[in-house]
Amino acid sequence: MKIAVFGTGYWAQFQIAAWQSIGEEVVAVWNRSRDKAEDTAARFNIPFVGQTPDEVFESADFDVADIITDAAIHEELVHLATRYRKPVISQKPMALTSQACDRMVQAAEAAGIWFAVHENFRYQPPLQRLKELLDEGCIGRPIRAQLQLKSPDRAIMDKQPALKTMDHMALMDMGPHIFDVARYLFGEAETIYTRTKAAYADIGAADTALSLLSMKSGLLLSCDLVHEFHHKAFIEGEAGSLLLDRDNVIQLQTDGTRTVDTRTWKTLDYIPSEDWLVHGGHVFSAIPACLEALRDAFLEGRPADTSGKDNRETMRLVFAAVRSCEEGRAVRLDESGI
C-alpha cells in the first residue's frame, strides 16, 4: 500500500516510521514548512515532496492520504481528499467542532470514499487484554469503572508547544483517546459531567479533566485525564474486579487473585530513547498496531473500527464534555449541537 503523508510534525515522524515498519511505502509528503517536509523526506527516503497539498493529490501515485497535521486543517485536507476521490485517514482529534466533524463524515459518504481516524489507544496491549477479559465475562456484569490516562504535563507541552494555548487542552488532546477507550470497553454513554483545571499557573492550559459518565448499560464510569495516578483502570463487576496498574499489569480478583502481565511489546529501534521514556512502550507499540488494523480494513474493503462515522461518536463525547465544563452541568449525548 502506498501512503501520502500530510504533516511532518512530532508524531508524524513516529507514524511514518511505523508505516515503513509494517512493510508499507510512504511515497509522498507535504508540510506547510517545506524545509521540514524535505528533511523528513530525506530521513525516510520519501521520493516526492509536494509544494502544496493539491500537488500531492495531482502528481503523486498513492493509495491512501494520511493526515498528521494539527487539527485546525484536518477538515480542509479531508475535503480535498474527497474532491480527488482518495481514501483518507485523519489524525485525532477529527476536528475542533462538532459541525466540522459532521461535514467531514458527510463529505466522505457523499464521495463514496473510505475514511478513518488514527485513534490508536485502544490498540495498546494492556487495553486489548483488558477488553478480552471483559468479553470473557470473568468479573460478570460491570457495575462501576475508572479510567485514568496521562494528560500533557510540562515536559510534554515543551515538546508540543501548541498544546499550551489549546482551548480545553486536556479534553481536546487526550479526550479523544480516553473516550474512545471508554466506548471500546463499555459501549455508549447517555450523560457526561466534566470539570477541568490548569495545573501550571504560568501556562494556564486546562491540562487536567475529570468526567463522570452514565453509560447506556447502567455502568457508572469515571474518566480522568491527570498527571499522576496509581492505576490506569479499575472495573468492579458483579463477580469480581479488574485493576490495570501503572506498570501495565492486570490484577484479576474473583475467588482468588490472578496476575496478567501485558508488557508484551518489543523495543522499537526507530523511537528515540528519550521519547520512549516519556510516553512508554505501550503507547508506541499501539501506533503500528493501529496502522495494521487500518490497512487491513482498507484492503478488505470494510469500514475501520475507528472509521470516521464511528469516531464521530467519540468526538460527540469530547464536545459534550466541553459543553459540560462551559455550562457547569451534566450533558446528555443526544442534545443538539454536539
Image (tube, rainbow, N blue to C red):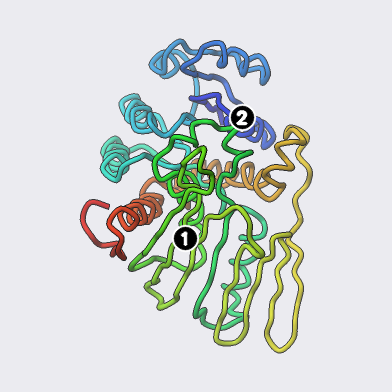
Observer-nearest of 130 and 195: 195
Label 2 is placed on what type of residue? Ile
Q: CA distance from mark 1 to mark 2?
A: 33 Å
For the point 56% across and 83% down, the residue is: 140
Residue 220 locus on image (x, y percent): 45, 74
Left or right of 69 in this view: 44: right
Kindly identify which residue carries mark 2. Answer: 16
Residue 235 locus on image (x, y percent): 57, 74
Left or right of 104 in this view: 224: right
Observer-nearest of 28 and 325: 325
Label 1 environment density (alpha carbons within 10 Å; few <14, some 14–19, many ≥20): some
Residue 289, placed above or below residue 37? below
SS under mark 2 = helix
Label 1 is placed on what type of residue? Leu
The numbered mark at residue 210 is: 1
Left or right of 244 in this view: 166: left
Residue 161 locus on image (x, y percent): 53, 31
Q: Are marks 1 and 2 in contact (CB under 8 Å)?
A: no
Q: Upstream in the sequence, badge 1 or badge 2?
A: 2
For the point 52% across and 79% down, the residue is: 142
Mark 1 against mark 2, which lies toward the viewer?
1
In the rendered image, is residue 63 in sight? Answer: yes
For the point 70% across and 68% down, the residue is: 250
Extreme residue in the front direction: 201
Label 2 environment density (alpha carbons within 10 Å; few <14, some 14–19, many ≥20): many
Extreme residue in the bottom direction: 255
Screen quadrant of the N terminus: top right
SS under mark 1 = strand
